[in-house]
Amino acid sequence: MHVLAAMSGGVDSAVAAARIAEAGHEVTGVHLALSRNPQSYRSGARGCCTLEDSRDARRAADVIGIPFYVWDLAERFHADVVEDFVAEYAAGRTPNPCLRCNEKVKFSAVLDRALALGFDAVATGHYARIVETATGRELHRAVDHGKDQSYVLGVLTAAQLERALFPLGDTPKESVRAEAAERRLSVADKPDSHDICFVADGNTPGFLHDLLGDAPGDIVDTSGAKLGEHSGTYGFTVGQRKGLRIGTPAADGKPRFVLDISPVDRTVTVGPREALAVRGLTASSPRWCGTAPDGEIACGAQLRAHGDEVRATARLDDGVLRVSFPEPVGAVAPGQAVVLYDGTRVIGSATIDAVDRVVQPA
Amino acid sequence: MTTARRTVYLDHAATTPMLPQAIEAMTRHLGRTGNASSLHGSGRAARRTVEESRETIGAALNARPSEVVFTGGGTEADNLALKGLWWARLAEDPRRRRIVVARIEHHAVLDPVVWLLQHEGAQVDWLEVDELGRVRVESFREVIEREPESVSFVTLMLANNEVGTLQPVAEIAALAAEHGIPVHTDAVQAVGQTPVDFAALGVDAMTVSGHKLGGPYGIGALLVHRETKLVPILHGGGQERDIRSGTLDAPATAGLAVAIDHAVKDQPAEAVRLAGLRDALVSGVVGTVPGACLSGDPVRRLPGNAHVSFRGCEGDSLLLLLDARGIECSTGSACNAGVAEPSHVLLAMGYDDERARGSLRFTLGHTSTRADIDVVLENIGPVVERAMSAGLQNVGKAG
């Protein structure tokens, strides 16, 4: 096969590319340039981090012995991921940009271009497994559950999965590092990336503030009593406890959490932990890794990246996914994805729109 | 895609394979000891090598030997010329703050000019080019004669590195000379491809690079007229007329001298041979691929340059597909991060983003043969077709 290996400059994608090449496929490494720094003099020059990642990816490709190119996906990434990210926060929701990038960039724009250029598949260093079955391909959690990234791949359709390769899904992260060292890949001890790649300093509220500006409003309790002020609802996520800067403590002395974000009247509502409990949710834009569920199914559900899987039942109603939880679950933020599992298999995903709380808001 | 077979190297403007004679000369000297600044026998032997190289280069380019200043390559020579002229001219007259430069220069010229603009208070008169990449002598005249006493220097490349268009450097130098304004020219792409005569051009400084003409990497020269003053940018042992310090690389000077000597002697015949191959390549590509067209001046251009734009596809895609077939060319000038930005040269020529992105530069040189051209012509049709199906990456936002 002719395989395009997306190489971020990190250890995972380097080992993934090396494994595919060693398996006898014709591999071409491609680094996706996703951001540009408009402040710098030469228009389109990349920020230093991206440049360094690009060089690391190039070095890894040299060591593996495969051709290497950089593809400029900056405009596409900005339109599909960054703008969506900002718009979602502005609407009081909490987006997952990695998931959006997989859906719209890596396994859409990049995959489409790769297929058109004659490649058969796109490989990445994601920790997830593809299992071949008689009825088609299935997406499963990685064997290393601590590193599992099937959540951010839950948006892939069956057609996209047909062209995806995840060579690391059966390997623990530490083994991947050891293998990178054995293969003399200099990225073997490069730290994992955790932050959102386009928020250079990791300060998401600051990044959003620069783009969305001041939009001050009140922080209130569930009765509507004002407890404090904020400079923009986009700085909050449902379930957030830290950084609320409320002067007066709660009557019972217990911590308060963000329950609701309303950009229209610029109000952030807070309350006790119990008020966060959710017994169900509705979600839109469902994407199925295989066939869509027929009727109500019992399944597992994951509600955020690295979140625990909870028991659920799910039903597709006219394009709206309705999920309910036999045991109430904690903070659920609209904008995040709900990914449904059958054992380790990903059934599909949808974007959370609304939650059904155990304690109904006053 | 097809697995790479024989490599067809058509990227001589990026770097040209070293001539065997230059390799021989350089390696012969690599085994010898001697700092050209030392006074003993070994030092004198190295000095002799350097001075003989200087004389050879001077003779080949019609400059006095003392006008040849060795540098660590073309970029250094451009920086030395521009910053050196800037500070020297300003020291003589504080009014001299205008730099006259065309938008199609190489980054080794553009970036020092912008640096002077941002850090030293320079004012820049940017000169436009026409759709063939030509500057107009009249526009230089207008800009210079507006206020000649405030002009620091003029710089204009002999031949453009991307589209190969030749520029009227001698005419510009003549009109600048009327006002005593110094002129620098970047001749990196020109030597070996067109006749280059330093004295006849009438410029004050001229940049030459070793690896673009069959010589070694990491060495170049700035030819500096003996009456032209330059403030040095590298300070140290005072080598090279105190203009450029640093221990001289005697083996590299020997390799450079042999390469320049051959390039200049072979130039008349090579120009005819390469133009023939180039024309076959261009007419073949244009005849095969609908919508393909030659960029730059069709007549006054480097004989080895074939710059072609294609509609509806990315140069990036074309390059990848050709590379997989063993055909090596360029989408423009190579960029550090490896990201293909629309070329500033093509944008200056009025190309839209799409056409600028869908361009390929094939550059021929001493190793190029008819067989190379045939391989390109066999492959270009299917490659463009495939690249067109991959479309334009950044045209039209995604839904």
Image (cartoon, rainbow, N blue to C red):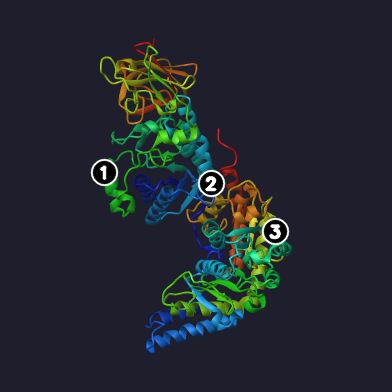
* Marks 3 and 2 share the same chain: no
B265 lies above or below A265: below
Q: Secondary structure at mark 2?
A: loop
Q: Residue at x 33, y 15 (%)?
A: A275
**From mark 2 to mark 1, how far is it between C-alphas?**
35 Å
Q: CA distance from mark 3 to mark 2?
A: 31 Å
Q: Position of residue B27 (x, y in %)?
A: 43, 79
* Picture coordinates of residue B175, whole percent (x, y): 71, 70
What amino acid is found at the position of numbered circle 2 in the picture?
Leu
Within the image, what quadrant is residue A310 found in? top left
* Element type at mark 1: helix
Q: Quadrant of the C terminus of chain A?
A: top left
Which one is nearer the viewer's eye here, B228 or A144? B228
Task: Let me know if marks 3 and 1 both belong to one chain.
Answer: no
Given the image, on which type of amino acid does mark 3 rest?
A: Leu
Task: Give the number of callouts.
Answer: 3
Q: Nearer the viewer, mark 2 or mark 1?
A: 1
Please state which of residues B9 and B60 is positioned toward the viewer in this rendering.
B60
Chain assignment, label 2: A
Q: Which residue is mark 1?
A: A174
Figure check: B304 above or below A231: below
**Disc 3 marks which residue?**
B132
Q: Residues within 10 Å of mark 3 (few under 14, many from 20)?
A: many
Q: Secondary structure at mark 3?
A: loop
Residue B88, located in which quarter of the rendered image? bottom right
Badge number at residue A117: 2
Amino acid found under the numbered disc labelled 1: Glu
Q: Are marks 3 and 1 in contact (CB under 8 Å)?
A: no
